[in-house]
Amino acid sequence: LDNRPDVQELSKMIKMYQLYQAGQKEISTKLENLDSEFQVNYDYNPIHHMESRMKKIQSLLEKADRKGYDLTAESIQKNIYDIAGIRVITNYIDDIYKIEKLLTSQTDVTLLRRKDYLKHPKESGYRSLHIVVKVPVFQSKGPIDVPVEIQIRTVGMDMWASLEHKLRYKTDTDSNLVDKYGDRLKGYADELEDIERGMQDIHRDLI
Ligand code: 0O2
């Protein structure tokens, strides 16, 4: 980066991370509670597993720089919503929307942004539901709303995204690989969707 933030700004960003991490924990707990409740009442778990990550400061600054935002804690907080991220991997496609509805209908959770890459897959074939919600974090001086990005997708879509991410990452060193595998992967994304919808139909008949 040419315009690195000074020590004072960096220290503000580090403090800001504590707040975002707390927001991430609030949402993770809500999701875990929903999943346990499903187990007790319906003998079924919509969530296969979850992963949480905090965006590394270096990636955060690079993203802000790329998007042309000031590299200050204030500007980053105002413009970037995926500092705290949770990935929810579900068993079936229906579960994606079920989780979204159950989470966003909670009174202290507010939906800020929504991108449905299931209804509108990306050019690559990528499918996932991305939502950003805000949740209050109770600090010593009172509550502060914190945005958390949640990516919700099925086991199949997650497996696909991991492989495709590797391909894109490798592209930096070998662009032939995208020419070689890009179309095939896109085709697999469509096939996976067919298979997951078919399996969901069978599962629906079994519960
Ligand atoms: P990381 O480390 O995964 O976070 P925005 O956040 O909305 O300002 P953008 O780029 O419009 O910026 O967000 P988008 O495309 O809705 O979501 C970005 C994230 O979605 C990526 O994070 C990936 O995790 C995932 N993603 C989006 N498109 C693809 C795709 O074609 N293939 C794969 N494998 N993943 C995708 P980052 O930025 O890569 O970093």
Image (tube, rainbow, N blue to C red):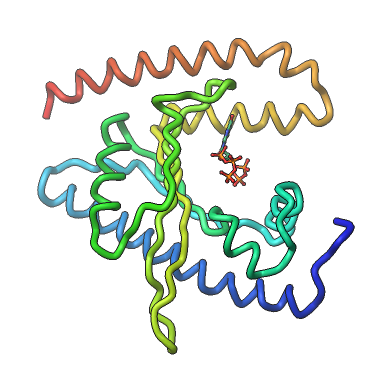
Q: Quadrant of the C terminus?
A: top left
Residue in the foreground of this view, choosing between 163 and 82 = 82
The N terminus sits in image quarter: bottom right
Asked whether 57 or 109 is in front, the reply is 109
Q: Name the spot of residue 40 as percent of width and height, x first.
A: 13, 51
Q: Residue reaching furthest bottom?
A: 140
Percent across and percent down for residue 20 are: 51, 67
Where is residue 22? Give x, y as percent: 46, 70
Position of 145 with respect to 14 (left or right) is: left
Note whether 61 is above or below 10 in the view shown: above
Q: Quadrant of residue 154?
A: top left
**Which residue appears at 86% of the width and 61% of the height?**
3
Between residues 50 and 8, which one lies in front from this camera angle?
8
Up/down of 86 relative to 122, above or below: below
Q: Residue at x 58, y 16 (%)?
A: 185
For the point 58% across and 70% down, the residue is 17
* Residue at image coords 24%, 49%: 102
Ligand 1 quarter of the rendering = top right
Is 93 situated left or right of 177 in this image?
left
Count of all numbered marks drawn on residues in the image: 0
Is residue 16 left or right of 146 when viewed as pictured? right
Give percent across and percent down for residue 75: 65, 64
Q: Residue 18 appears in which quarter of the rendering?
A: bottom right
Q: Between 174 and 113, which is closer to the camera in this rendering?
A: 113
Is 136 on the left-hand or right-hand side of 15?
left
